[in-house]
């Protein structure tokens, strides 16, 4: 039986990845940072909370990482922990750099010091492309991050590559474009919209306040994307891969899909609120997943419409059960 250590197991991707690895027969260990008041809500939603071993640790505390890696002797480490919200990274740029950037180096060092044979996955991000240098972004596209989050992720990405080249470690970087689900945090625009649509539909909310609705993203489903993480670590050689759908849509398109799913017109409820504009914006992201398709035999299965509709349905169900 293989053992996998997942940092960020209480987050969206951590929950879906834990479920996938449990289904594949892994012993799944989660690093628990004890940051939120109800850290297990996502794992409970997927009904897997009791099947996971938890160990205390924090990405900013190298000693805790060394202790956990030594104790559980993982075959694979998936580093998903981060301060992951772009908007918050301007309010907390130093914390974001310490967790989302330096944290990657800490876990790489913990692995190198303990057992450099451990396979490593780094959750890199399309936010590294930021002010896009090519209209469609692939593994070859130059980076130009536009937020403290994007800068921190770029540091983690290059460290992951550097440890592969310096120490021949099996380190992979997944450059994942936005991926969403009913387990997405409420601060992200998709879930903010689907949650608001559900509340408006049952009469609990009157309007939805958003910032830049012309921003375009390549949105996929988190449940599809975690499989790509696992596939990267099953290849004969470590590498970096773009994971995306190859289609981009605006925030406005997303609102239209979500509201019309409950028979409403988004224009009757949407209020543009400048407080949600960002100091620097990423106007458009569009990924080219060809390499993942060819080498990993991976492709996104869930369409953008299906994704938004399933998120609205999940929010409606939750609200009705409250
Ligand atoms: P989430 O924000 O849902 O999860 C982040 C996780 O990191 C949580 O479990 C959180 O714990 C944990 N965490 C935060 N700070 C620390 C710390 N100091 N030490 C240990 N754990 C910590 O993110 P997602 O699941 O959406 O994303 C997973 C990863 O993929 C992140 O690194 C994200 O930046 C990256 N990514 C995500 C994309 C997306 O569209 N979802 C796109 C590209 C990359 P707690 O619950 O206590 O807060
Ligand atoms: P990001 O791509 O990781 O920043 O994911 P988000 O879901 O946070 O934001 C996606 C896009 O939606 C960005 O271009 C935001 O500027 C835009 N957006 C517009 N209004 C909002 C809002 O109210 N909240 C968030 N989070 N994003 C918004």
Image (cartoon, rainbow, N blue to C red):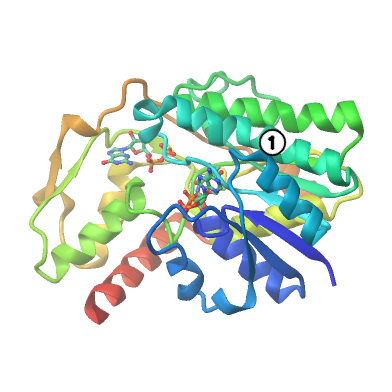
Quadrant assignment for the N terminus = bottom right
Identify which residue is drawn at 36% across, 47% down.
188
Would you place residue 170 above or below residue 94 in this image? below
- Give the quadrant of the C terminus: bottom left
Q: Nearer the viewer, residue 290 or 104?
A: 104
* Residue at (57% x, 53% y) in the render: 8
Q: Taking 105 as reference, is 8 left or right?
A: left
- In the picture, measured across the screen, residue 146 lies left or right of residue 50, that is left
Does the residue tagged 1 have its C-beta within 8 Å of any atom of ligand 1? no
Q: Is residue 213 above or below residue 16?
A: above
In this view, 270 is above or below 101: below
Taking the image in four quarters, ligand 2 sits in the one at top left
Query: Could you tell me residue 205's position as x and y percent?
Result: 11, 60
Describe residue 209's horizontal placement relative to residue 123 as left or right.
left
Q: Quadrant of residue 194?
A: bottom left
Residue 190 x, y percent position in the rendering: 35, 51
Comparing 103 with 309, the one in front is 103
Q: Is residue 129 visible?
A: no
Residue 206, horizontal then vertical, whole percent? 7, 57
Relative vertical location of residue 191 with respect to residue 156 in this rendering, above or below: below
| Crowding near the residue tagged with mark 1, few <14, some 14–19, many ≥20 C-alpha atoms within 10 Å | many
Q: Is residue 146 visible?
A: yes
Q: Quadrant of residue 168?
A: top right
Q: On the image, numbered disc 1 is attached to which residue? A: 106
Q: Position of residue 19 (x, y in %)?
A: 62, 70
């Amino acid at each position: 039986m293989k053992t996998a250590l997942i940092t960020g197991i209480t987050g969206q991707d951590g929950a879906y990845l834990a479920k996938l690895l449990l289904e594949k027969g892994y012993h799944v260990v989660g690093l628990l940072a004890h940051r939120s008041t109800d850290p297990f809500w996502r794992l409970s939603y997927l009904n897997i909370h009791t099947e996971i071993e938890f160990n205390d640790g924090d990405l900013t505390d190298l000693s805790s990482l060394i202790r956990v890696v030594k104790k559980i002797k993982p075959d694979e480490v998936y580093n998903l922990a981060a301060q992951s919200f772009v908007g918050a990274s301007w309010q907390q740029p130093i914390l974001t750099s310490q967790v989302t950037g330096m944290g990657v180096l800490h876990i790489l060092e913990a692995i190198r010091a303990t057992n450099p044979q451990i396979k490593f996955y780094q959750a890199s991000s399309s936010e590294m492309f930021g002010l896009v240098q090519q209209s469609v972004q692939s593994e070859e596209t130059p980076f130009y991050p536009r937020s403290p989050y994007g800068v921190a992720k770029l540091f983690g990405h290059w460290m992951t590559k550097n440890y592969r080249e310096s120490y021949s470690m099996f380190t992979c970087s997944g450059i994942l474009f936005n991926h969403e689900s009913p387990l997405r945090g409420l601060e992200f625009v998709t879930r903010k919209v689907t949650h608001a649509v559900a509340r408006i539909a049952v009469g609990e909310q009157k309007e939805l306040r958003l910032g830049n609705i012309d921003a375009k993203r390549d949105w996929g489903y988190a449940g599809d994307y975690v499989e790509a993480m696992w596939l990267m670590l099953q290849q004969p050689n470590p590498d970096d891969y773009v994971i995306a759908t190859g289609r981009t849509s605006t925030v406005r398109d997303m609102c239209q899909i979500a509201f019309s799913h409950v028979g409403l017109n988004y224009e009757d409820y949407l209020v543009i609120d400048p407080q949600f504009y960002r100091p620097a914006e990423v106007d458009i992201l569009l990924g080219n997943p060809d390499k993942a398709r060819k080498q990993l035999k991976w492709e996104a299965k869930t369409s953008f419409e299906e994704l938004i509709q399933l998120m609205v349905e999940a929010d409606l169900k939750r609200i009705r059960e409250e």
